[in-house]
Amino acid sequence: MTAAFDKRITDHPILGPLDTTEQCTIFVDSKPLIARLGEPILAALMANDIWITRFTKKLGAPRGLFCGIGLCNDCLVFVDGLGCVRSCVTAVEEDMSIETRTNEKRRF
Amino acid sequence: MRHGRTRSVDSDILVVGAGPAGLAAAIEASEHGATVSIVDENARPGGQLLKQTHRFFGSERHQAGTRGIDIGSRLVATARDRNVDLILDTPVIGIFNGLVVAVNDNRHFLSTRPRRIILATGAAENAISFPGWSLPGVITAGAAQTFVNVHRIRVGENIVVVGSGNVGLIVAYQLMQAGSNVVAIVEAMGQVGGWGVHAAKIRRMGIPILTRHTITEAAGDTHVEQITVHEVDDRLNRLPGSEKALEADTVCLAVGMSPRSHLAEMADCAFTDVPELGGTIPIHNAIMQTSIRSIYCAGDVSGVEEASTAIEEGRLAGLGAAFSLDLVESDLYERRAAICMKALDDLRSGPFGQQRKTGKDAVLREYDEYYKNR
């Protein structure tokens, strides 16, 4: 996917313009990123062109969005203070610190 | 953050799942004076209706011409109006001999022993496997719909949709609507699976529907970069030399759904296998009561169909549960049940509905057998 391809749907023929008034800063692998307040962590990651949430422990294979509704556990990330969470159903909070690609660092 | 605090819920009826079936059940039961709580694992009520930006078909009773998202908000508003207690962010983790245990907001336990339980836990999407199917970029059609229509994130630039049932067709259209390019829809059968009206819309947009084709590989380093499809014969074997490469960064799998019946299993409901309805489902009677008398089911968990049938089944389950608690007069009960059952028959007519009707009839027969043999 080209980096120039806009990931946020800022306007939609049925749903109208996207409300981006409430934003927050999250830290993904120590890097600050802007997220929409209340959106799932995974939506914020994808909006910022981050598609890999973790690597599998045995094979080191990349994982990201799969089911999007908290059933498959492919999109697990590590959040400071919360532990290992499903990024597709866990909302971002101001100053949240998130670690992706954690296979070597932590056991899921 | 306080861990381990237990909140108790003392409603007559506990509904699991705040989708169309669960909301309709709660509304119906509360209309007859039952106290009802709904628990749902999501932050917002409405279930899959939250992402249905398309207009529904059918009759006036089923709000034809209204978008799914609006049907969802109406149900939620009505439920709140009727003082239904909506408990969100609360996955139910088990049913232990009538005791329902859930985790509220990642922080507290919630446990309750309601007089009646209505399971409206919906369905989960199926997947198919092929080399590369676990790469980022291979997602379910529901994931695409959730991210595009709810979270407003484009899931890919060039997308291949696998499966041409209504879900595949509708999601392909909605992906285009949101600014992605749908490269093709791949369908293993000889004809399109979904309604002609949806397929016509797709064809008008110039999206090819490759019937008799299946996906055989997704390739890429850390994300999908290229898709391979093959033509297949009647037995779904690949035709040698029919391989085609498609440039795409995303694959959406729209290959059916299975009832999410884990809680019914834990509660020890009797099951039957009905392929027409998506797999293994709790047997139930016409009023949606399972083999465990205090437990009802409604919507996709009782057989995968669609939102309008889920709403009617929800009404029946809510009515049945309220009646069993002596909250409904017999003649009112009979009258309302007959209206819902007639509506379900109408929804299960026609070429697409007949198969589901056959499946549901098989479930009812199983239920009768089950009681005959006890």
Image (cartoon, coloured by chain):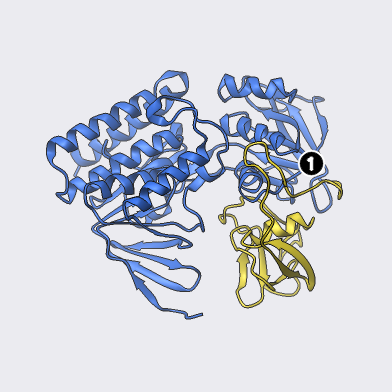
Chain colours: A yellow, B blue
Question: On screen, A65 above or below A58?
Answer: above
Q: Chain of mark 1?
A: B
Horizontally, is B295 left or right of B305 in the view? left
**Residue located 23% across and 30% down the image:** B338
Most distant residue in the front direction:
A21
Question: On screen, B127 above or below B342?
Answer: below
Horizontally, is A64 left or right of B332 in the view? right
Question: How far from the left and from the top, in percent, is residue A12?
Answer: 68, 40
Q: Quadrant of residue B214?
A: top right
Horizontally, is A101 left or right of B16 in the view? right
Q: Quadrant of residue A88?
A: bottom right
Horizontally, is B106 left or right of B128 in the view? left
- Numbered disc total: 1
**Residue located 68% across and 58% down the image:** A21
**Which one is nearer the viewer's eye here, B48 or B221?**
B48
**Residue located 55% across and 22% down the image:** B195
**Residue located 69% across and 29% down the image:** B186
**Label 1 neighbour load within 10 Å: few <14, some 14-19, many 20+:** many
**Which one is nearer the viewer's eye here, B183 or B163?**
B183
Q: Which residue is mark 1?
A: B157
**Element class at badge 1:** loop
Question: How far from the left and from the top, in percent, is residue B69?
Answer: 52, 41
Question: How far from the left and from the top, in percent, is residue B124?
Answer: 52, 46
Question: On screen, A24 above or below B123?
Answer: below
Dividing the image into 4 quarters, which one contains the C terminus of chain B?
top left
Most distant residue in the bottom direction:
B2
| Amino acid at pointer 1 | Glu
- Could one spot residue B308 in this view of the protein? yes
Question: How far from the left and from the top, in percent, is residue B326?
Answer: 14, 49
- Could one spot residue B291 in this view of the protein? no
**Which one is nearer the viewer's eye here, A108 or B36?**
B36
Question: On screen, B226 above or below B94?
Answer: above
